[in-house]
Image (tube, coloured by chain):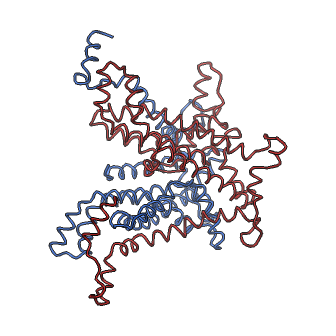
């Protein structure tokens, strides 16, 4: 260590904004980002690779071209988008109602925390338990597997996340705006439509986007409650990677990753930290 | 809400005066009451949660205590005793306790994965929370969050071409003349995949703690002569441990119940408990035994949360951070 360094060390961070961020720390951070994105990069690379495995890499777009002929994959992608949209709408509406219910009303003591806890239980128990339970439940009802059980499972799975995102907005809302609207003669409904809802819009849109992407990528619940007639994309991908991996899997995966990343990036920007 | 707030709210709220109000007024007043509004806004959701969440999960509990079809066959404890296998214990043949051993292995893997996740999380969150340049910070944090919201199924199977015998790592090793390593279809594969999928659960709460840490404390330690490592060990680590543990509890319970990652990367030696639950429903068609195994897993998960809360770990601190959960 040079004299200058040791002096800088003694003086502290005022003279050196990077004090403490040693090169070891920066390297560890860089490696962690590599760890987080390496496998995603591998999927992208493999989707453009003519060979299989190994370090040799020959560029090709034939897997993307052959996707067009894979009606099973296209059908599953379309089904997953449909499920995602239905789940998004139901989940977001319920989340707005739940968020207001949880944060706006003076609950009698103890009941408030219980209601909060009930809504967040689905975050705590393993998803596989819920998937199996739902499978047994719908079999007992005689409904079996299919579109409706998947939507029900996904709504219950996405609702806690959506409620949290909307709830953060409700708590952060400036109530004086609503009071001002009421003082100026607006009835509660008009106030809600003209003042509350626009102020909450970023959170509501973020909740909708999160609900869609969670449903779109959800595998375990779908795995247990989807039948052969309606196979969502993650279940289709599962079947393909359990056997010998076909190269088309990488291509469709890149499309799925792109959809999720774009939606997650939009939602994260909208959400107030 | 504190009790003082309640008293204040009660004082402000107009008290109903039933003897003077007409029926219409009373109904209107009741409709305006907080309890009614709360019931209207939360009632449907609680009903939904009960019918479509609590009942399905409770159904597994019901199945686990009947011989076959619930309420059509006798009550029994046989499914749980099959898990424990009393005969193997009495004859001291502990190697026969396959289900118990599998659960034990899952918990062991969960401990390893939790520790590794915490070790990986500390440097990056310390950097992001304390040292990252302001204008890059939001972008860098977003880069951590985004993989969290992408398909864990895809991110898991992506390790197959990396870890397999002729995959990236082993090809690189053999190219430079080193022997190849068995990384896939064993517990190593399970552990790598699980750490990868679950590390955001420790990174995000730990980042929140790191960001909230007053940097002048670190400066003070440094001014008093502590080295970087000492400042970390004596100041940063103890103050951020609660955030780390909150995330760690989540990684633990999610790993203990993992199904996808061990199925794709774990092979036989990486086989985990949730896989035998699925087998009972998928191929063995023994729903009652499968339900009993599921109930045991729920007990392990809830027990972990209970112990963690007794130790003062703020489990709820990380509840909202779940992206594609397994």
Report the front residue among B112 and B239.
B239
> Looking at the image, which residue sits at the far right?
B91
Residue B36 against residue B89 in the figure, above or below: below
| Residue in the image at 67% along x and 45% along y | B103
Q: Chain B takes which shade in the image?
A: red
Chain drawn blue in the picture: A
Where residue A156 appears, as percent x and y from the top left, is: 50, 63
- Specify whether B268 is left or right of A110: right
Report the front residue among B173 and B57.
B57
- Specify whether A88 is left or right of B264: left
Report the front residue among A44 and A135.
A135
Residue A149 against residue B197 in the figure, above or below: below
Where residue B110 appears, as percent x and y from the top left, is: 59, 41
- Specify whether B228 is left or right of A49: left
> Looking at the image, which residue sits at the far top?
A3
- Specify whether B99 is left or right of A206: right
> Looking at the image, which residue sits at the far bottom?
B22
Where residue B156 appears, as percent x and y from the top left, is: 56, 43
Residue B66 against residue B199 in the figure, above or below: below
| Residue in the image at 77% along x and 44% along y | B97
Quarter of the figure with residue A131:
bottom right
Residue B97 against residue A180 in the figure, above or below: above
Q: How many marks?
A: 0
Quadrant of image for the N terminus of chain B: bottom left
Quarter of the figure with residue A100:
bottom left
Where residue A87 appears, as percent x and y from the top left, is: 46, 64
């Amino acid at each position: 260590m040079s004299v200058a360094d040791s002096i800088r060390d003694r003086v502290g961070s005022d003279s050196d904004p990077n004090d403490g961020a040693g090169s070891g720390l920066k390297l560890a951070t860089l490696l962690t980002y590599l760890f987080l994105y390496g496998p995603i990069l591998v999927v992208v690379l493999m989707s453009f690779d003519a060979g299989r495995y190994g370090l040799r890499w020959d560029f090709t777009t034939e897997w993307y071209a052959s996707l067009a002929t894979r009606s099973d994959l296209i059908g599953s992608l379309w089904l997953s988008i449909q499920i995602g949209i239905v789940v998004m709408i139901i989940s977001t509406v319920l989340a707005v109602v739940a968020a207001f219910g949880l944060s706006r009303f003076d609950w009698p003591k103890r009941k408030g925390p219980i209601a909060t806890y009930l809504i967040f239980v689905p975050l705590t128990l393993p998803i596989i338990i819920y998937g199996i339970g739902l499978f047994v439940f719908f079999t007992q009802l005689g409904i079996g597997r299919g579109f409706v059980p998947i939507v029900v499972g996904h709504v219950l799975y996405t609702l806690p996340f959506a409620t949290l995102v909307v709830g953060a907005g409700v708590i952060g809302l400036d109530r004086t705006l609503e009071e001002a609207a009421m003082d100026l003669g607006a009835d509660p409904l008009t106030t809600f439509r003209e003042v509350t809802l626009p102020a909450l819009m970023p959170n509501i849109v973020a909740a909708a986007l999160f609900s869609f992407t969670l449903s779109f990528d959800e595998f375990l619940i779908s795995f247990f409650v989807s039948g052969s007639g309606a196979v969502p994309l993650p279940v289709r991908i599962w079947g393909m990677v359990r056997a010998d991996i076909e190269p088309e899997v990488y291509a469709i995966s890149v499309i799925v990753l792109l959809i999720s990343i774009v939606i997650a990036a939009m939602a994260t920007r909208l959400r107030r930290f | 809400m504190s009790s003082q707030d309640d008293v204040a709210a009660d004082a402000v709220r107009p008290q109903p005066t039933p003897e003077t109000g007409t029926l219409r007024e009373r109904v209107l007043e009741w409709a305006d009451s907080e309890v009614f509004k709360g019931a209207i806004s939360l009632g449907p959701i609680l009903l939904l949660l009960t019918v479509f969440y609590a009942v399905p999960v409770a159904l597994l509990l019901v199945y686990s205590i009947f011989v076959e079809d619930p309420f059509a066959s006798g009550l029994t404890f046989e499914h749980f005793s099959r898990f424990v296998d009393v005969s193997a214990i009495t004859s001291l043949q502990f190697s026969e306790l396959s289900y118990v051993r599998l659960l034990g292995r899952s918990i062991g893997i969960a401990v390893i994965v939790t520790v590794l996740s915490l070790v990986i999380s500390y440097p990056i969150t310390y950097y992001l929370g304390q040292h990252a340049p302001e204008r890059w910070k939001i972008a860098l944090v977003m880069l951590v969050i985004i993989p969290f919201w992408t398909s864990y199924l895809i991110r898991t199977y992506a390790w197959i071409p990396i870890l397999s015998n002729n995959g990236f790592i082993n090809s690189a090793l053999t190219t430079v003349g080193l022997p190849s390593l068995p990384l896939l279809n064993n517990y190593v594969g399970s552990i790598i995949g699980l750490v990868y999928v679950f590390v955001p659960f420790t990174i995000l709460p730990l980042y929140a703690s790191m960001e909230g840490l007053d940097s002048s404390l670190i400066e003070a330690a440094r001014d008093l002569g502590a080295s970087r490592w000492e400042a970390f060990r004596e100041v940063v680590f103890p103050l951020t441990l609660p955030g780390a543990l909150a995330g760690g509890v989540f990684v633990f319970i999610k790993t203990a119940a993992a199904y996808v990652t061990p199925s794709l990367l774990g092979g036989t030696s990486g086989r985990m408990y949730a896989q035998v639950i699925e087998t009972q429903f998928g191929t063995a068609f023994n729903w009652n035994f499968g339900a009993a195994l599921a109930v045991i897993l729920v007990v392990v998960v809830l027990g972990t949360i209970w112990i963690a809360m007794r130790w003062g770990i703020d489990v709820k601190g990380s509840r909202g951070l779940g992206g594609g959960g397994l």
